[in-house]
Every structure is written in C-alpha cells, then in structure tokens.
Image (cartoon, helix red, strand yellow):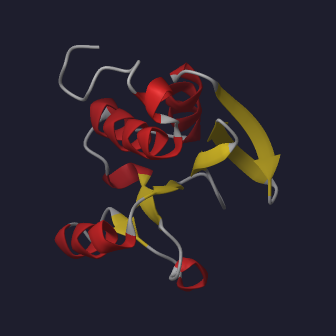
Amino acid sequence: MLDADDVRQIALSLPQTVEKEMWNHPTFHVAGRMFVTVPDDGTSFAVRCPRVDRFELIASEPEKFWVPPHEANSSWVRARLAALEDLDELRDIVVDSWRQAAPDELADLLPPPGAGG
C-alpha cells in the first residue's frame, strides 16, 4: 500500500525540490512554490489542480479525489493514497503538480509522462 513516504520519495526525486514543514506537516516546493503536501494523518496528499479541472476529476473519481470545505476556493485537490492504483499513478499526479509549480525552463528538463523518463 502506498504511504506518505512514497509521496516524499517521488517529490524529492524531482529537480530542485525542497521539503519544508508547514502547518505541522511536510510540504514540498520547487522555485519557492509549493506543489504537494501530506496533511493530517498521512493517508492522503494534496496537489495543485486548476479549479476547472478539479470539478471533473472529483466527479469522475470521487473515491480518489476530494476537496475539504476549507480548501474549496483554492486550486488544490486531495487524493487518497489507498485509492490509487499503483506507484506510477502516484508519480503521475505528483509530477503533474510539480510541472504546474516549476518554471517552464525547469519543467522542460523532465520528460513528459509516458516518455520513458
């Protein structure tokens, strides 16, 4: 089963990622912008997700994704680790969030999903 350590390992494997503790839990940043955090009890994680995409994502997979009421106006979504298919799906989600936070010239260094990188 996937856990918070898997999130940490993937996040820290991405270029120029740093870990910081905020709100008493780990957060991961690139170029000064947070792209993933592991809140609460470590059974879920939060990533960047444009609000327009977030509604469709939650509607299509409500067992995986949700937004707590206090984050309703943000551009973040949470994912339940136990509901993810495998490490590849977790990596895809974390990398997508990293790409949203990273400067373009840095994001271009990472191969796109499915490119074998």
Identify the image quadrant of residue 99: top left
When the figure is inspected, residue 35 is found, relative to residue 87, above or below; the finding is below
Instruction: Say whether residue 57 is left or right of residue 102.
Output: left
Horizontal and vertical percent position of residue 54: 33, 69
Residue closest to the far front: 105
Q: Which residue shows up at 44% across the image and 34% down it? A: 104
Rendered image quadrant of residue 29: top right
> Which sits in the foreground, 25 or 73?
73
Q: Is residue 108 left or right of residue 69?
A: left
65 vs 2, nearest the viewer: 65
Q: Position of residue 66 (x, y in %)?
A: 40, 72
Looking at the image, residue 58 lies above or below residue 30: below
Given residues 107 and 56, the one toward you in this image is 107
- Name above or below for residue 52 compared with residue 10: below
Question: In the current view of this chain or complex, which residue is farthest to the bottom?
Answer: 69
- The correct choice, above or below, for 68 with respect to 2 in the image is below
Number of callouts:
0
Residue 51 at x, y percent in the picture: 38, 72
Q: Residue at x 70, y 41 (%)?
A: 32
Q: Is residue 53 left or right of residue 23?
A: left
Which quadrant of the figure contains the N terminus? top left
The residue shown at (22%, 72%) is 56
Residue 81 rendering spot, x and y as whole percentages: 42, 50
Q: Would residue 110 be found to the left or right of residue 4 on screen? A: left
Which quarter of the rendering shows the C terminus? Answer: top left
Task: Name the residue located 52 percent from the left edge and 82 percent from the top edge.
Answer: 73
